[in-house]
Amino acid sequence: MHGRAVSYEALPAVPPALAALGWAPQLASALEALGDGELLPMRVQAADRGSYELLGADGPMTAALAGRVRHDAGPGELPVVGDWVAVEPSPPTIRHVLERRTVLRRAAPTGALQVLAANVDVVFVVSSLNRDLDARRLEQFVAVAADGGAQPVVVLTKSDLLADPSAMLAQVRPVTRGVPLVIVSAQRGEGLEELAPWLTPGSTAALLGASGVGKSTLVNALLGEERQTTAPIKRTSDQGRHTTVRRELIVLPSGALLVDAPGLRLPELWAPEQGLAAAFADLDALAEDCRFSDCAHRSEPGCAVRAAIDAGELDPGRLAGFLELEEQTAGRTQRPWA
Ligand SMILES: [Zn+2]
């Protein structure tokens, strides 16, 4: 035995079945505060237009959403995959959404907030290590991944056709400064063990990336089997018929939970704070030496960021990418997940 013995007696006991789903003492306190002993804590595995697939200590359940929860929900507050909810067992009804620790969110093409998943610990930003790899796109994905409080990790899926990836890597290094970078070959099963530190039992990971970057191959490799593809849900909207891909929580053999977010072409960042700091750690560090603490790095005198560009120490594309993302988020609220 190493280290000091720690007493856990003060913490509420977490039932093992719930712990496996990511249940934590602060959630237990939140549930208790609702003051209704009938309510069951369950996690949203999938949400499908008013019907929710839930996982709990006693197994899965399908539940509806209480009208009051629907009515009172602000933007982005309806339950999504990964949410912890308090459920009335009979008839199965979601009565409350417990406070979220983190969210994976973006600005939808309409400009509205869209929460893709909740209570995510780590977001794997998946990109393929080939000629399509673009530093500007990657930094935008990293910013979106970190925006709602999750830890971003860049996962580059190696194309077996690419003999020497070093030139590609040199291009993405500045973007991944301060962000862990893992290279995997899902087809060959190489590099997957490097993801293990983020895939511990009860932790929740999400995959974010454009279509065709090898996300499904990666999911299958992590599962150790070919995943049954869920049939896309057909929807009819005012714009006509379109198809959406279902997001759901998958339990991995490691005991971690994984949310497979459908391919997003280039998600727009919702709020400027955490996402930009994570994706632009180098720029952030330089900005500490700007003469003005609120320097916008445009035309202010004594701008350390522009000085670094003039000195050839910073790629001008980095500043351009930063300013573009900052502009994207202008005027949006900065509440934790709304
Ligand atoms: Zn500056």
Image: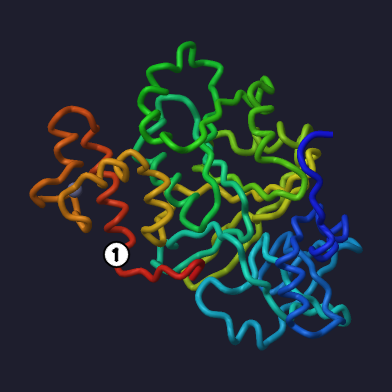
Which residue is rendered at x = 71% and y = 66% of the image? 26
Establish if 40 lies above or below 187: below
Which residue is rendered at x = 76% and y = 60% of the image? 23
Residue in the foreground of this view, choosing between 32 and 164? 32
Which residue is rendered at x = 58% and y = 34% of the image? 214
Across the whole image, how many numbered discs are drawn on residues? 1
Task: Tell me if 59 is positioned left or right of 232 in this view.
Answer: right
Residue 173 horizontal/vertical position (percent): 39, 28
Instruction: Identify the coloring.
Output: rainbow
At label 1, which amino acid type do we have? Ala
Please identify the quarter of the rendering in which residue 98 is found: bottom right
Residue 104 horizontal/vertical position (percent): 54, 57
Toward the top, the furthest residue is: 163
Q: Quarter holding the N terminus?
A: top right
Which residue is rendered at x = 29% and y = 64% of the image? 330
Q: Which residue is mark 1?
A: 330
Q: Secondary structure at mark 1?
A: loop
Residue 146 horizontal/vertical position (percent): 48, 51
Toward the front, the furthest residue is: 4
Task: Tell me if 242 is positioned left or right of 137 in this view.
Answer: right
Establish if 70 lies above or below 281: below
Residue in the foreground of this view, choosing between 184 and 293? 293
Residue 310 horizontal/vertical position (percent): 13, 33
Disc 1 residue crowd, few under 14, some 14–19, many 20+, Cα 10 Å: few
Q: Is mark 1 within 8 Å of ligand 1?
A: no
